[in-house]
Amino acid sequence: MSNGGGSYNAQNDSRAGSTGEPDIGTEPTGGFFSADYKKHDDLKQMLDSNKDNLKLEAMKRIVGMVAKGKDASDLFAAVVKNVVSKNIEVKKLVYVYLVRYAEEQQDLALLSIATFQRALKDPNQLIRASALRVLSSIRVPVIVPIMMLALKDSVVDMSPYVRKTAAHAIPKLYSLDPEQKDQLIQVIEKLLADKTTLVVGSAVMAFEELCPDRIDLIHKNYRKLCNLLVDVEEWGQVVIINMLTRYARTQFLDPNQQDAVADDDKNFYGDEDEKDSEEEEDDDEKEKTPPKKPYMMDPDHRLLLRNTKPLLQSRNAAVVMAVAQLYHHIAPKSEVGLVAKALVRLLRSHREIQHVVLSNVATLTTIRKVRGMFEPYLKSFFVRPSDPIHVRTLKLEILTNLATETSISTILREFQTYVTSSDKDFVAATIQAIGRCASSISEVTETCLNGLVGLLSNRNEYVVAESVVVIKKLLQMQPDSHSEIIQHMAKLADSITVPMARASILWMVGEYSDRVPKIAPDLLRKMAKNFINEEDIVKLQILNLAAKLCITNPKQTKLLCQYVLNLAKYDQNYDIRDRARFIRQLVSPAGEKGALGKHAKKIFLASKPAPVLDSSFKDRDQWQLGSLSHMINQRASGYSPLPDYPETAPDPTVRNVEVNPWEQVPMPWAEKTHKKKAGKPKKEAFYSDEEEESESESDSEESSSSSSESGSESESDDDSKSESGSDKEKKSDEEPESSSSSSSESESSSESESESESESEPDTKPQKKTPPPKTKSSAKPKKEAKQEVSLLDLDVIDMSSTSAPVPAPASALDVLSPSLASDLQGLSINDKKDTAISVTTPMFVSTTSHELLHRMTGEGLAANYRFTRGTCIYSTSMVPVEVTFTNHTDSPVCNIRIGDKKLQAGMTLQEFPEIPSLPGGGSMSVSIGIDFKDTIQPANFQICTQDRKYNVSIKPPVGELFQAVTMSEADFTAQQSKLTGMNENSGKVSIPSQHNNSKTITARMSELANVAPVSSSQDGLYRFAGKTVSGGTLLLVTVKVGEDNSANITVNCELMAICSMLVKEVKQKLSQA
Amino acid sequence: MISQFVILSQHGDILLFKDYRGDVGKESPELFLQKIRDLSGGLAPPTFHHDGIHYIHVKHSSLCFMATTRSNVSPFMVIELINRVASLCKDYCGVLSEEAIRLNFPLVYEILDEVIDFGYPQGTSTDMLKAYMENSPVLVREGTTPGLFGAERRMVPSTAANKSIMGTAVSQGRKNEIFVDVLERLTVLISTSGSVLRADIDGIIQMKSFLVGIPEIKMGLSEDLTVGKEDKRGYHSHAHVDECSFHESVDLSEFGQSRVLTIHPPQGEFPLMKYQASGDLPSLLPFRLFPTVNDQDSSRDMELVLKLRCDVPSTSHAVNVMVRVPVPKATTSVSQQLSGPGQSVEFKAQEHLVVWSIKKFPGATELTARFKLAVANRTPSSRLELGPVSLNFELPMYICSRLQIRFLRLFDHEQSYVPYRWVRYVTHSDSYVIRI
């Protein structure tokens, strides 16, 4: 981290340089768009010039063209050579251009690759990240291996920003070459283990894109993800929450099992309506085995729910919705209620968001069990005049779903006013909604019907038509009890003029003529009288009515029917003539009864099925809430339905993180920054450089004689010769150039110093530059950064000296392919080399925490701390300590911070940023860093709140002063031989026989101290290595188990006090029963 | 994972087109526009799909931001992302308008490049992004665009705040300025009988900071401000909100006792505080309407008298008041009688609407308008087609929740500069409906 800060400054410097140039950005470029720019010659000229402001101007125009979607591909050659520009502004625009056109001009694009590779090793994290981003965005299949290498390097970069970019690069690489999937999944696995909030969100994005089904990768990270969630940036939160929803569905039991059973019982007695709405769900649940034991929520399940809850307050609607869907899908029904408020709050934001929220709420309200939670917010769903039609219909839908016996009167009153709206579609939708309310709530059916009948007198024909249709539907469902309404409607036929409504009334009277036996013939009589003046649709219905009556009541109506049919025979409209002819044949055939006539009754008076008035959102709850598929109510590509809960819970122990053997992520950056910090004595620089050449990265030798050191060194040198040989060869002859061109590089002093040292090493021979980019991307970034500069500059010189750009691509291709081979070689060799001493992640991270501040003393504020054994984010010489504050009171505690520090000389303590407010009952973790200077002296300091100060102290257990390192057995013995005499301390202990096995001993040792086991060739001989966090002093522990369960413990360390203490503790630990 | 991001002008020109994943064809904006036109006049839902491609769009002050995708993303995420991009563009270009986008192609393109990577959103905070941005903005000259401070609703003629946060000291003679807007939107529904069915305030304190560095700001709100829904509010009218939420840069430690907010404002525009109040408002509603409908069967005309009273203190006034009265469909003509100058009436026969507009409406006064509606073949139901009346207005320097900013102090230890502080209060009608 600290190094990241340093390089950031460097970036500022270089930017300051760029702003020093004439600022052309404020000049309007608008005039250009009208100008004739068919020929891009002027642009090319400007790009070729050596003035940055001209180049910038040209690039701005070009990007303007790109942005407008105009073709600017013929400028590619001219643009691409500016990729080396020192001006960051120009460079960024070139990047933008490259990403757009690289796919079309692959050959030329390859010319720029070298620049990116160089930039990947830039000390500035922003440059590294942007290089990686652009490199991965260039869709040229040839460079996949290069991208892969860059990716692998970046994943272990010290800057979280670069690692985040690497995570983003994974899907790009995958889409370019799906065959890399397996390798990429490994990379994802590494990134998922990352503990930085910046990275995990992007890592999960990549996970979701590549391998959403590899749920096993999540187990170990599950708790970490839950705990980090609040601090992850908002977009990451969305992705993580969605992923965890799926995870929870596969790993935890259904929290609502028992409810389901209870509901079944209730249904038995419940009324009809309820049963209908619930039947489907319950059927699903019934199929499952009935719960055998009372349901206990998995603590991890609870953890997820608890940690997502505060996110309902997020100002990002996507996060709120993600949490809402999480609660809907995996929380016990009793807890889902709290999302309602958050969702209603979202209604107040942008109109577009409103639409999406409403459609989700509409789905939620179709589910009877959760419907209740929206009832208090009924008024929020009232339609406003400013709402667009799609929002209005959604609101209507919700209001209809929410209607209950108690709220129906409010809702109906509201509906009444909607009916007067001038928007036809909306009115129609409202009337339909009234109809649905009427059909679902039997108490108000009557009222609604009356209201609807009242609407029949509306002038608006849509209102009338819709009302009649809805009344028709309602009557079809329960025709028995409503003959008076039919009567009433028959009477209305006199006054209503809207043809559609008249037609509907006639249809209804005909259909239910048996309910109004007296009125029906009379109506027909009236209609027949006025037949010729009616509209066509009414005429058709008169014919229908006549036919139906003729069948049921021939005595009274036969003649009327004949009359109507005769009138229709000479109608102008052929439809009506046709219908009349057809009916005549059926009802009163001229001759003998036709074959069809017998069935006339069946044909005309078949009982018509009642229409179902159902919510159109009924079927939407099959989709995962908040997803696009839900929104459009059909399967979007990439949608996978939420799995059902498992019947029995999978093993919950998979989420334990005590032992994570795969997690051997080397953290070279930690080592490097440490070196700089530690201020290594100058005279030993030579050896350390040597070491860096061989990638061993150990700095332990600074304390000791170098005789044995050199032995191990040369050994590893041999290993690496094959790949690093060529580096060395070129270094000497390219050195002057690199130093001259390194103005943009601002490496830290120690880095550049060691660099020059290594370059001044006696080298084999000054070699000419035959296969230039051969080592472009071999695995170790730092030492080649310089070299890349020079290589590239040569390339560029080549290119710009040839006026025609045509030959360049060919040569670039030629040069590139062998380098790929060597890249891959380098990779495989690199994988094997493990001889060095390097810091690794801890084998074991204790979850037990120690008390810092008791809640009695702290007046409700309690603090615990634990040693996380990671790399401290503040400084590598600090021991990271996680402090968790818990507020046991009801009122918030404000301004929690660290006050006065009383530290031993030399010790430093990095404070956490002040906690502005800790709500009542809430808890919060912060991390602090303490440099104990390799002593076990306690760090005393004060914790201050708004009005109180508490004195507390942290005393480190001796084992926490270390950092685990890995080394080879040979290294171990070599180092051990240097630490004899005063630096060696030993003791004897008898190990209980049941614990005398390698597993227990290793586990106990790593529990006791942050050390890593060293592979041992001997049985009964266990070795562990670590180094102190602050000074970097090597610690070697050997446990030799003898015949009779007795063990010899030897600890080698320069710090004698620590030596003896550790021996004591190891004895104690191992002798535990 | 969005595939493309397009910014379209009001007329459907493509202003900016960025492809992230290359899995959707380049003709997508045309298809999108075609779809939009097919769907009822610009009221298309924000998401729709066509031929396997999902189009998600949001309109922001006459610009249309559209994203396409092929995969199952959360529509919230895309909409939220679009909104963020829009506000970023505004922060960096000063204003959000077609011209600003046109002038700042490289800049906006760079923003899009930084914010979205391969269709995945990255960081979207203005501050964070500033570290990665290299292009400098081209400012839209004043006067070329109407005052567009804020969203389309806030039409306060002030271009003072339309600056890019990227401006450098050299090019602009940049001042240390901070703008604070207290904006409230009223949603009111009044029934036929004159009782208030619904009165909601949607408030926001918006801050736009051009301060150098991140100084500490203390903002004091009304001391009598109460938060929450407790019933014992008493009868005296003090500032009250039901719930409020704050921006992450706000330190609330003093809020509980003295209603003082401590703020470390990031640069650019951000919502400092959002609050809602509903039910009984601490102050009177700004407008009351007393309608009389004279609807006798004998005459062919319908007479409508609207008496509108502005209940804000006489020191304030409302501007741009528009009273919209839906009239029966069969209305053929309208004649009116107004009580004073500065008013006008327009009859929109197409929409069956009478619009009565008042330029300036002083507080504690009353205006009357008398309309005669000529309605062809009148029926009793014609009366039902009248109304509801909706009002649009703007009330500068008046806030219905009575929330006040008592003071705004800056604390900066290093620089002793005098910052320019601007505070503004505006109330807008979101939906002010009176049923008659």
Image (cartoon, rainbow, N blue to C red):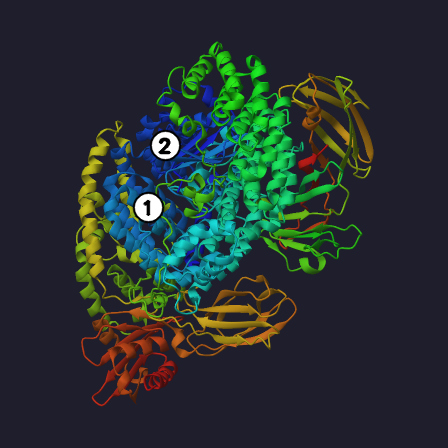
- Discs 2/1, front: 2
**Do residues under tags 2 and 1 come within 8 Å of each other at their CB atoms?**
no
Gap between marks 2 and 1, in whole Å? Answer: 24 Å
Q: Residues within 10 Å of mark 1 (few under 14, many from 20)?
A: many
Task: Give a yes or no on whether discs 2 and 1 share a subunit.
Answer: no
Residue for point 44% across, 52% down: A279
Give the image quarter of residue A134: top left
Give the image quarter of residue A931: bottom left
- The residue carrying mark 2 is B51
Q: Inspect this view and state whether residue A685 appears.
A: yes
- Residue A276 in the image, given as x and y percentages of width and height: 47, 49
Which mark identifies residue B28? Answer: none
Front-most of residues B144 and A412: A412
- The residue carrying mark 1 is A171
Three-letter code for the amino acid on which mark 2 is drawn: Asp
Secondary structure, mark 1, is helix
Residue for point 32% across, 57% down: A189
Q: Disc 1: which chain?
A: A
Front-most of residues A772 and A656: A656
Three-letter code for the amino acid on which mark 1 is drawn: Pro
Q: Disc 2: which chain?
A: B
Secondary structure, mark 2, is loop
Q: Inspect this view and state whether residue A672 appears.
A: no
Q: Is residue A16 left or right of residue A783?
A: right
